[in-house]
Amino acid sequence: MDFNKPMGKKEFTKEISPEGDERLRIKIISQKRLITDIMVQYESKILDKWHPIVRYDCSHGFFHRDILTPKGEKSKQAIPILNLKDALTYAEQDIKDRWEWYKERYKKGIKK
């Protein structure tokens, strides 16, 4: 096994609203076609600025969801999915199904 071989890394965004102001930022890291790390983040353009609202990742050694607030706080919930390909599918589908709810929750924390 060649440990010096660079890992594959893909980063891209996907629009999830027709207006183009709701998107997913996705990062996938793989080695030899095996996904080793993922990040799926829902971002919304509010008052002409992009805000991260929900993020799924493995940054603490386990797959979890962070729900973010305008103040920079986050609540972390472990998601018991070990296969990162399945985790990627779960994260993307959850955000596509519930982005409006996540956005409303986030907007309640914005001080006018």
Image (spheres, rainbow, N blue to C red):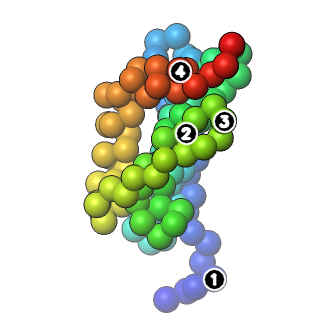
In terms of secondary structure, where does tag 4 sit? loop
Q: Residues within 10 Å of mark 4 (few under 14, many from 20)?
A: few
Q: Residues within 10 Å of mark 2 (few under 14, many from 20)?
A: some
Q: Earlier in the sequence, mark 3 or mark 1?
A: 1
In terms of secondary structure, where does tag 3 sit? loop
Query: Mark 2 belongs to which amino acid?
Result: Leu
* Residue underneath mark 4: 108
Q: Earlier in the sequence, mark 2 or mark 4?
A: 2
* Residue underneath mark 2: 68
Q: Position of residue 69 (x, y in %)?
A: 58, 35
Q: Residue at x 53, y 62 (%)?
A: 59
Q: Which mark, residue 71?
A: 3
For the residue pair 96 and 100, the one nearer the viewer reads as: 100
In front: label 1 or label 2: 2
Q: Residue at x 46, y 25 (%)?
A: 105
- Distance, label 2 to label 4, CA atoms, is 12 Å
* Residue underneath mark 1: 4
Q: Is residue 95 above or below residue 27?
A: above
**Answer yes or no: do the residues labelled 2 and 3 have beta carbons within 8 Å?**
no
Is residue 8 in sight in this rendering?
Answer: yes
In terms of secondary structure, where does tag 1 sit? loop
